[in-house]
Amino acid sequence: MSGGAHPDPAALAQVLDTLCPMHLLLDATGHIHHAGPALGKIRPGRALAGLRLLEVMELRRPRADGQMAALLALAGQKLHFALRDAPRTELKGVLVPLADAFGLPGGAVLNLSFGISIVDAVRDYALTGDDFAATDLAVELLYLVEAKSAAMEELRRLNLRLDGARVEAEQAAFTDKLTGLRNRRALEPVLEGVARAGQPFALLHLDLDRFKAVNDSHGHAAGDRVLQAVAERLIAGTRDRDVQIRVGGDEFVLVLPRAGGREAVANLARRLVAAIELPVTHEGQELRVSASFGACLSDDYDPVDTGRMMRDADTALYAAKAAGRGRCVFYSPDLGDMGPGPPA
């Protein structure tokens, strides 16, 4: 521009409100200078201007500290955020530094979108096509979601068999072939689902004791049979709404919605330890293992952070191993950092 003048932030905000309604203008300290109109519907009644970006949302990937310099270092990369308030909606974003332009020296523009969570966002926040840029393909998706016509219903029926095959493929991708439980890929969606539901839940990280000795002495076929038996006992010892996940090797995770508090979880863990310690018969031989549990409760976290809960459950599991195995230990800050992971 002539004379070296730059538009002021208000002029820039007016342009961005039309081009990308889900944007944030950040100043050099990482505080929100202006929020696009669509973001106002996500947090009704709460002014975003003046708040720090990371007070409003958590940067999940890639990891960075809360300083503006660290955020600017991620310019141009795909950023994964989650709102800190329920329902913890996930957002995708890209950040562009403003340098010394537009009256916000050292600031940046952060453009956001819902990604694959668009349908949930439309339901949760009553969004319409006016909340998106005219060129945003989300507008077309909104139209398809809202347009319940007979022709679309007929198309759904015609594609039913293909959809069934797709569902089977997705289920296979999230299923452990040996035990029939869900696998590690299913862990994050399951945790995000129970956290989003807003109801209390328990998280238990389970590792078998003396499993390596079974493999070493009797072979991998015997070890596989033990893992299958443990999976059967976990299913039999928990409720229909509980989720059992084999995360790898002889490690399992239990997600227990509405578990009933610490005493109920401790009693359940004791029953499961007793069940797992029963002998497993394989080719005429009795195989024996035990189990150690690390546990934590969502009620102890505000806000609920499933990543931190997994780390804390792992710490508690290591403490259970160190205390003699065959038991359940609940996480507490007194445990500190028990190490990189439980011994076999």
Image (cartoon, grey):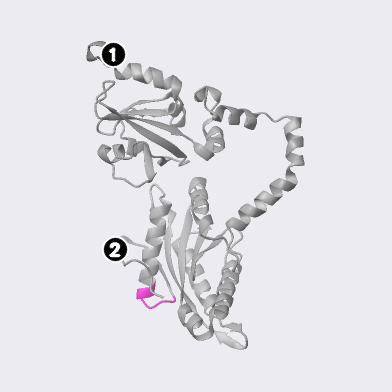
Quarter assignment of residue 123: top right
Pointer 2 residue: 336
From this view, report whether residue 211 is shown above or below residue 29. below
Counting from the top left corner in percent of width and height, residue 132 is at 50, 25
Q: CA distance from mark 2 to mark 1?
A: 57 Å
Res. 177 in view? yes
Please state the extent of the stretch shown in magenta in the rendering: 321-326
Locate residue 73 relative to residue 169 in the image: left or right: left
In the picture as drawn, the residue positioned furthest to the left comes out as 3
Pointer 1 residue: 1
Locate residue 299 relative to residue 246 in the image: left or right: left
- Looking at the rendered structure, the kind of residue marked 1 is Met
Residue 105 tag number:
none
> Looking at the image, which is closer to me, 3 or 160?
3
SS category of the residue bearing label 1: loop
* Magenta stretch contains residue 22: no
> Looking at the image, which is closer to me, 47 or 154?
154
Res. 258 in view? no
- Looking at the rendered structure, the kind of residue marked 2 is Gly
From this view, report whether residue 174 is shown above or below residue 40. below
Say which quadrant the N terminus sits in. Answer: top left
> Looking at the image, which is closer to me, 74 or 37?
74
* Magenta stretch contains residue 323: yes
In the picture as drawn, the residue positioned furthest to the bottom comes out as 284
In the picture as drawn, the residue positioned furthest to the top comes out as 2
